[in-house]
Image (cartoon, grey):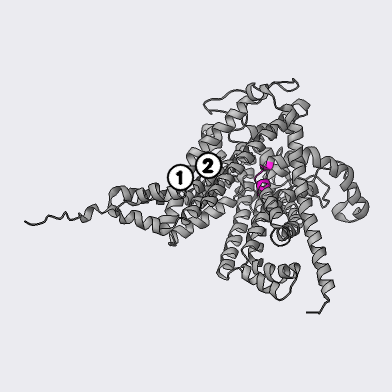
Amino acid sequence: MAINIEQPNISQRPHKSPANKLFRMLGAACCCLIVLVMAGIVIELFIKSQLSMNTFGWGFLTSSTWDPVNGKFGALSSISGTIVTTIIALIIAVPMSLVVSIFLVELAPEKLSGIFGTAIELLAAIPSIIYGMWGLFVFVPIMGKYINPLLSKWFGNTFLFSGPSSSGLGILTAGCILALMVLPFITSVMRDILMMVPPVMKESAYGLGATTWEVTKDVSIPYGLRGMVGAVFLGLGRAIGETMAVTFVLANDHTLSSSLFAGGNTIASTLAVEFTEASDGLYLSSLVQLGLVLFLITAIFQIIAQVWLKYAGKNGGRS
Amino acid sequence: MRPRSITQRKTLNGVVTLIAGSAAVFGLCMLVWILYTVVSRGIGAINWDFFTQLPKPPGMSGGGVANAILGTVMITAAATIIGVPIGMMAGIYLSEFGQESKFANTVRFVANIMMGAPSIVIGVFAYTIIVLRFGFSGYAGAIALAIIMLPIVTRTTEDILKLVPNTLRESALALGAPEHKMIFEVVFRAAKSGLVTGVMLAVARVSGETAPLLFTAVNSKFWNWLMVGETGNLTVTINDYAKSAFNDQNTMAWGASLLITAGVLFLNITARLISRDRKAKR
């Protein structure tokens, strides 16, 4: 009697079944959707800002006139406000996060570093509008009463700290709040990078008799330097596009001023304040173009950060 | 390197530890200060009415933000329904099929850039593409939030699925399971807690977003169960009330801040506990 072994039908192999094909295609379609949305954002913003581009040309980026009543728009004050607040934020936040992350990874006792680390990650999750609220109601009065007068007493003759300072609002305050906001974010990224340093490298340095600080300075930091620079870029991207933390304290002032005490605006804050007020086509179009400028700036920094981190990854993080 | 005595080196080490420690304490204090402010100023606004009543007109005390709580929950839920399945499918594709192909790498690159895009720009996009055609609605806000979620969910799904050992996949395939069954019934089960954590963190991230809702969902003083037209929500309520000249409204803004902060932190802590359990089980 011949044994009848059922031969599997080639066309019914699970890999080739229609359900499987459909599944793969669905996955690929979702991936395409991400790319399409991204392209859609760029194209849509570009189209909707055509009116403003045609009216002002490149002058849009170099003019500081922002006059909705007479229909004259220039982005210079917004762009400079964005850049200055970001620089202030990074000047404060980067050294602090570096020091704090070193403390968490290298210096603190393990238990303490666990608690601190979790706290910092939770704080990075707090919505930015909370920072904005706190800034407006708590930090602005403190800046106005104590810190700004002190700064103007010490450095009042330099252009950065001239002019009236008692309101507490303005670019400097916004920069400080921004610093506070990106601090937990940059710290947690830097902490992750420092934790990736192979223990063997640190142990060999300790074995040579180095102190904790010497190990940190000569082994951990050089090893993670590229990753840390990447972390700064990521923080930069966050600070540039941040809206709610700065909008309340900037006073939405479009005049260009060299003083950090003066009110100002960033691209994001202008969008937040004025978008719903935009009554005519040109106003709206100018605001959309501002959005496009902001998007392109952050995209450029993202791309730099990505390429940088990829390069860092290839070199094993060493510089 | 200049030779130094052991005392000098140890002193330097101590000084640095002190500086770093005090910086850490300073940073933590500032952030605890923020939390303390939110709790101490917000707790006064929290009562039964806060959760059940509609907002009162400016200048009148009492009332609540019930409609805004509902709006935030509905908008976030809608964003999750849109964003999570698409993001997960894309993540599955990247981890299981795309791997190192050129297409997959492009998608990863784009997703990373999208993750860094300012949320207000996403709001502008949602405004020009949806609101200009159909008017303000909770759905426009939900779509903006979904766009923010999409790359986050994609990348976390991919990262978590990659942690699942290949032997599991191979055993499922060897038993004759088709790929989608292998993924949903074997890989997903192994990665369940990680995926839940990832989704919860993404939900927490968007539920506190204000900027994308400012000109999509806007805000409203009334119930809006269908999310058509202006839809009340907590974060824009905070934004509006914080700028108000009336003390009652400022207090309401702090109450809403407390609620949203508590919600976001609750989601975060729960997510962390879930993923810690998973690590403990291994």
Q: Is residue A229 left or right of residue A146?
A: left
Q: Secondary structure at mark 1?
A: helix
Residue placed under numbered mark 1 in the picture:
B86
Q: Position of residue B211 (x, y in %)?
A: 63, 40
Query: Please, what is the three-letter code of the amino acid marked with disc 2?
Result: Ala
Q: Horizontal and vertical percent for residue B51?
A: 64, 25
Pointer 2 with pointer 1, Cβ within 8 A:
yes
Secondary structure under the numbered disc 2 in the rendered image? helix
Vertical order, B269 against B108 (above or below): above
Residue furthest left as drawn: A1
In the image shown, does B68 or B163 lie closer to the viewer? Answer: B163
Identify the main secondary structure in magenta: helix
Q: How crowded is the residue under tag 2: few (<14 C-alpha within 10 Å), some, or many (20+)? A: many
Q: Is residue B132 left or right of residue A75?
A: left
Read off the magenta span.
Answer: A121-128
Q: Is residue B54 above or below residue B192?
A: above
* Residue B124 lies in quadrant: top right
